[in-house]
Amino acid sequence: MTSVSLYELNEYITRVIALNFQEPIWVSCELSKVSDSRGTYYLDLVEKKEDSEEIKAQSKGILWLKNTYFLKKKLGSLFEDILADGNEVKLKVEVSHHERYGLSLNVLDIDASYTFGQVEMNRQRIIETLRDKDLLYKNEQIDMPIVINRIAVISSKTAAGYQDFCQQLINNNYGYHFEHELFASAMQGLNTEAEVVASLEQIKERKTEFDVIAIIRGGGSKLDLSAFDNLKISEHIAKHPLPVVVGIGHDIDQTITDLVAHTSLKTPTAVADHFVEHNLQFESELIRLEASIKDLVLSKIQEDLIFLQEANQYISFNVLNDISSRQDQVVLLENQLEEWLELYLRKKSDRLEQAEMIISMNDPINVLKRGFSLTKLDGKVIKSWKGISKGSTIETQLSDGSKLSEIK
């Protein structure tokens, strides 16, 4: 069996590659890891299966110092943005093979438009997914608390934007008191998704302890912000039971996180101002309501005073009229009473005269004067001769005296 040494094999591979890759070629891949040593960049290049994290191809890339100078001059600030872990890139590479160090892709140029184009394509795919799931405006539909006091903050502890946010809350012009708790998370790079999602989950478990969530970070490049063009972060924000306010430091670009949040603002300071203004609106409404209530009460009091005055005048007028009317009635009744008493006494007087006449007519003396007499036996008037015996003495009384007689 024929055999070759490892060196001979690698030398053969080197010649084959040199013959077949005489010109540089453009390669599309993902930067799995980027490291820098004195201006030379070492790149781990990968290609993953579609809709999967499984790697189907992998290689090493190197950007030598002399090419670094060239690309930094060409790309300016975009250079650092593009050479970041997780970015999709299109690199112009020189394929080489070394008998000891193996295959190497020497980077000669970078297509910046490809990287930004891939970012935008990925962004649009995520937006469509969120729209299909009806999540784009879900968090926006949550009612913001009337007063914001307890704030859950997702940010990097050392971020200047976080410090600005805290100072703006503490030193607000109206003396409002805010309580906030930091859920420290990476705000750029490969760890952003996992840490921000974990923070959102922690806050969800303690949702009764907070009024609102603030996701804030300082300024950054467009690719720095691409960490927030993320499906998992966006879904967790959209489905969160608390309103989410975002201020991740951008003036023009809008991330998907901005789209799904309840409220999107430019900077952490703007987020703090938003909370202060929100509470100021509530206080202003209270002041307006207080003034309205005072006006209403004063108006009601004035209205009641006018009513009481009118009622007093009405009562006074009607009481005087009633008293006058009653007085007239009393006078009338007095006159009627006098007439009635006079009539009554006259009637009684006539009846009395009639009674006196009758009594006078029936007086025994007057009867005797008319020719009548009274006969008595033993002092008792007799009306019949029965029981009167011979020899009895009777008394006969006439108007001018009486005489005794003896029965014969």
Image (cartoon, helix red, strand yellow):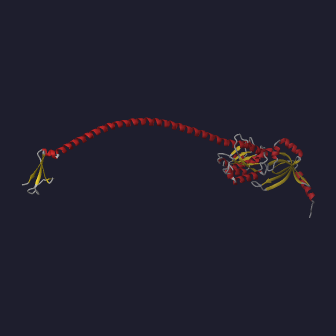
| Closer to the camera in the image, 76 or 322 | 322
**Residue at the extreme bottom:** 1
The N terminus sits in image quarter: bottom right
Counting every numbered tag in the picture gives: 0
Image quadrant assignment for residue 79: top right
Image quadrant assignment for residue 292: top right
The C terminus sits in image quarter: bottom left
Please tell me which residue is depicted at 33% across the width and 36% down the height of the picture: 332
| Closer to the camera in the image, 225 or 280 | 280
Rendered location of residue 327, percent (x, y): 37, 36
| Closer to the camera in the image, 341 or 388 | 388
Q: Is residue 315 left or right of residue 278?
A: left
| Closer to the camera in the image, 366 or 376 | 376
Task: Tell me if I can see residue 272 in this picture.
Answer: yes
Please tell me which residue is depicted at 32% across the width and 36% down the height of the picture: 335
Task: Tell me if I can see residue 256 in this picture.
Answer: no
Rendered location of residue 34, percent (x, y): 84, 50
Rendered location of residue 191, percent (x, y): 78, 52
Residue 123 position (above or below residue 295):
below
Q: In this view, does 5 lie to the left or right of 335?
A: right
Rendered location of residue 31, percent (x, y): 81, 50
